[in-house]
Image (tube, helix red, strand yellow):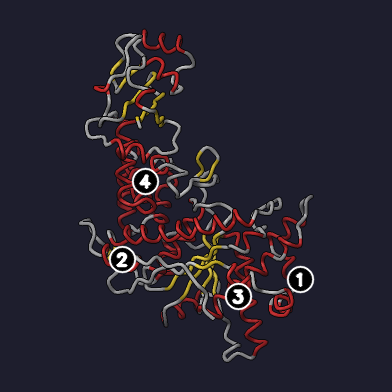
Amino acid sequence: MLFPCYVSRSFTFRIARVRNCGQRRRYHVQLDVIDDLKSRGLIADITRPIQLREEIESKSQSIYVGIDPTAKSLHVGHLLPLLCLFHFQLRGHQIIPLIGGATGLIGDPSGRSTERPLSERTKIEYNVSQLTLGVTRFFERALRYAYRRLDCSMFEILPPTVQNNLQWLESLNLLEFLRTVGFHSRVNTMIARESVQARLASQQGISFTEFTYQLLQAYDFFTLHKHLGCTIQVGGSDQWGNIIAGIELINRVNAGLGVDEAKIEKGFGITTPLLTTASGEKFGKSAGNAVSLNEQETSVFEFDSIRTPDADVGRYLKMFTLLPPSKIDSVIESHAKSPEARSAQRLLAQEITELVHDEDGVRRAETATKILYERDFATAKADDVVVALNGNPVLHRLEVSEAIDIPITKLAVKCHLAPSNNAARQLASAKGLYVNNHPVADVNQKLVPADLIDGRLVILRAGSQKVAVVALD
């Protein structure tokens, strides 16, 4: 039985194109993937590590990670499981990103104190299609990032096989589910799961729908193992119980069917740590919201500007980059001598932005940084700035008629740099209102074509902190 999957037609071609890209120093891939993942802090827990090493050394493996389609885009919380898969891909293993088109209709209780509202099917289907494209784009860009840094010539890189569990769960009838899954599942074990215990202890409790979620995820692993030879499941630390449920189902069904070598336990699990800062806060939150890997939701500039404390930067360089530990140690040593320069943070921002948004993303983010913070307008490209700041409230897109020959004080009000025309005029009179870093000379001064940067941009500033980037369409 084969399931239809999504593989980008141009993926193999793109791999060939990027093998020789870039002139920077390239490092060799560390052969032992488990050692590499551990040294980078990408493993929280692992099942039967000795046997897993033996399996990896003996033959190529197939590894999957589940992605919940309650949102249409990947966010930074997905990065660690995806990077774990990516390290396997770089060593010639087959990776399977699994989008939960069916389980997304149910809701995973793991890590939640309240029940998820049921999502409409049309919304889930749309999210699945968007996540499929997002996952494929992530691995394509990640490979380009890798080939600029690593020598992977000893391995054949396989494209990811993106699956949707609706393909097998939608046609699974209740009787078959009870005979295949229910018969081999013990209620006392299911109740003992940490996520279930937490919900049972809550005032709201847990619905039967969410209670059975772990069985559906277990069936996913069983199905991928049976039909695609998948041997390893990767997930966040809150997925440990669900992963174990899948391993148990695989082995109980095999034992019940009298499968050859049924006494040899099948299936492995790897969990990644919860992504937090040294102070215990979740990494990658922007104004309380998860930072998206989709630049339509989180601009490249915002993504590049995620602040990282000194206490975390070394750990994040190991997790989020492919730089070797020796290089990272050298960077941290230099950073410790001049922490005010934030050289380690700058390197981290460049690396993770290139990983997620490619080299073009780094260029656009650096252009926006020069304009907003360094006030360097000479080489600014308007298109780069607009794309980098897309979705950022500092960017204001206006028609030419809304800006040219309009008093700058009025533009300042329109761009929220001043609360009223009177306040804007007072600011201009006090030489506190700037156009492209030049103070407004007169309260009646108007914006003219000569003020435009690259024929399209103008930078307004009130005082030293409040900035507006005006782009004319």
Task: Give the alpha-carbon distance from disc 3 to disc 2, as whole Å.
Answer: 33 Å
Q: Closer to the camera: disc 3 or disc 2?
A: 2
Residue 247, label in figure: 3
Side of 236 where 373 appears, left or right: left
Residue at disc 1, secondary structure: helix
N-term mark: 2 or 1 = 2
Residue 187, label in figure: 1
Q: Say which quarter of the image contains residue 70.
A: bottom right
| Residue at 41% over, 69% down | 88
| Residue at 46% over, 80% down | 55
N-term mark: 1 or 4 = 1
Q: Say which quarter of the image contains residue 177.
A: bottom right
Residue with the most extreme left position: 23
Task: Give the alpha-carbon distance from disc 3 to disc 4, as whole Å.
Answer: 38 Å
Q: Nearer the viewer, residue 10 or 349?
A: 10
Q: Amino acid at mark 4?
A: Ala
Q: Residues within 10 Å of mark 2 (few under 14, many from 20)?
A: some
N-term mark: 1 or 3 = 1
Side of 60 where 456 appears, left or right: left
Identify the residue position indicated by label 4 in the image.
349
N-term mark: 3 or 2 = 2
Task: Give the alpha-carbon distance from disc 2 to disc 4, as whole Å.
Answer: 24 Å
Identify the residue position indicated by label 2 in the image.
15
Residue 66 in the image, given as x and y percentages of width and height:
55, 64
Q: CB under 8 Å between callouts 2 and 4? A: no
Q: Nearer the viewer, residue 398 or 194?
A: 398
Q: Amino acid at mark 2?
A: Ile
Q: Closer to the camera: disc 2 or disc 4?
A: 2
Task: Give the alpha-carbon distance from disc 1 to disc 4, as whole Å.
Answer: 47 Å
